[in-house]
């Protein structure tokens, strides 16, 4: 089943020079295609829309501050079961719990600075693609 998902390489990934490494892992999956890609700085309004589900949680304010601390790379990835697939490549939210071989497991140690966002369902993908790439959604 071909799908589309929104991927964000978070400011820590950009600062640490891991963009090529992470995009390379996505590119090498058979049958997946990157159909949009942009380096951009996220404003408060965009972050509030994107992470609205977490508003009011203790980690929300520091998360928004982190996500606006530098540019992110936003991508649209298309392909077979790509929503579940990029989440699997990323690993669980806490990088210490993430297995080596996953992006978070290989490069992260801090829950907030966990390198990558990927839509977690078809509904999330549709909603998030409209926020970041209204032209392609
Ligand atoms: P994401 O939305 O960024 O793809 O990550 P996720 O689904 O794996 O995790 P989620 O629960 O949606 O949390 C969103 C992001 O908030 C930061 N976070 N910090 N306890 C904490 O300090 C905490 N919990 C979550 C992480 O950056 C997480 O990816
Ligand atoms: Mg999430």
Image: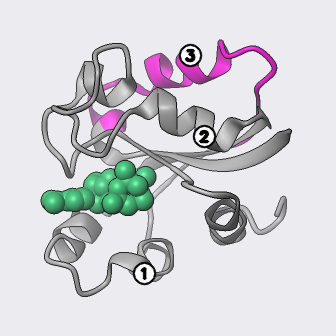
Chain-order first, disc 2 or disc 1: 1
- Of the pair 62 and 123, the residue shown nearer to us: 123
For disc 2, the neighbor class at 10 Å (few under 14, some 14 to 19, many from 20) is some
Residue at which label 2 appears: 84
- Of the pair 100 and 110, the residue shown nearer to us: 100
Q: CA distance from mark 2 to mark 1?
A: 21 Å
The answer to whether mark 1 is within 8 Å of ligand 1 is: no
Question: Disc 2 on helix, strand or loop?
Answer: helix
Asked whether the residues under the numbered discs 2 and 1 touch, taking CB atoms below 8 Å apart as contact, a structural biologist would say no
Nearer mark to the viewer, of 3 and 2: 2
Q: CA distance from mark 3 to mark 2?
A: 18 Å
Please state the horizontal and vertical placement of residue 25, each as a whole percent of the image. 54, 17
Q: Is residue 88 left or right of residue 99?
A: right
Q: Is residue 116 left or right of residue 23?
A: left
Residue at image x 36%, y 13%? 101
Residue at which label 3 appears: 24
Image-quarter location of ligand 2: bottom left
Question: Disc 1 on helix, strand or loop?
Answer: helix
Q: From the image, which quarter does the C terminus lie in?
A: bottom right
For disc 3, the neighbor class at 10 Å (few under 14, some 14 to 19, many from 20) is few
Residue at which label 1 appears: 52
Does residue 70 show up? no
Q: Quadrant of residue 104?
A: top left
Does residue 51 show up? yes
Magenta segment includes 14: yes
Nearer mark to the viewer, of 2 and 1: 2
For disc 1, the neighbor class at 10 Å (few under 14, some 14 to 19, many from 20) is few
Please state the horizontal and vertical placement of residue 20, each as a whole percent of the image. 49, 20
């Amino acid at each position: 089943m071909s799908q589309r998902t929104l991927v964000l390489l978070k400011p820590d990934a950009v600062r640490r020079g891991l963009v090529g490494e992470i995009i390379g892992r996505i590119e090498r999956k058979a049958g997946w295609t990157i159909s949009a890609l942009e380096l951009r700085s996220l404003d408060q309004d965009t972050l509030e829309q994107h992470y609205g589900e977490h508003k009011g949680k203790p980690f929300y304010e520091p998360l928004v501050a982190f996500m606006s601390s530098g540019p992110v790379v936003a991508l649209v990835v298309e392909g077979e079961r790509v929503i579940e697939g990029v989440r699997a490549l990323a690993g669980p939210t806490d990088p210490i719990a993430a297995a080596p071989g996953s992006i978070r497991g290989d490069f992260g140690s801090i829950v907030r600075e966990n390198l990558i966002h990927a839509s977690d369902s078809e509904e999330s993908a549709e909603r998030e693609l409209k926020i970041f790439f209204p032209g392609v959604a």
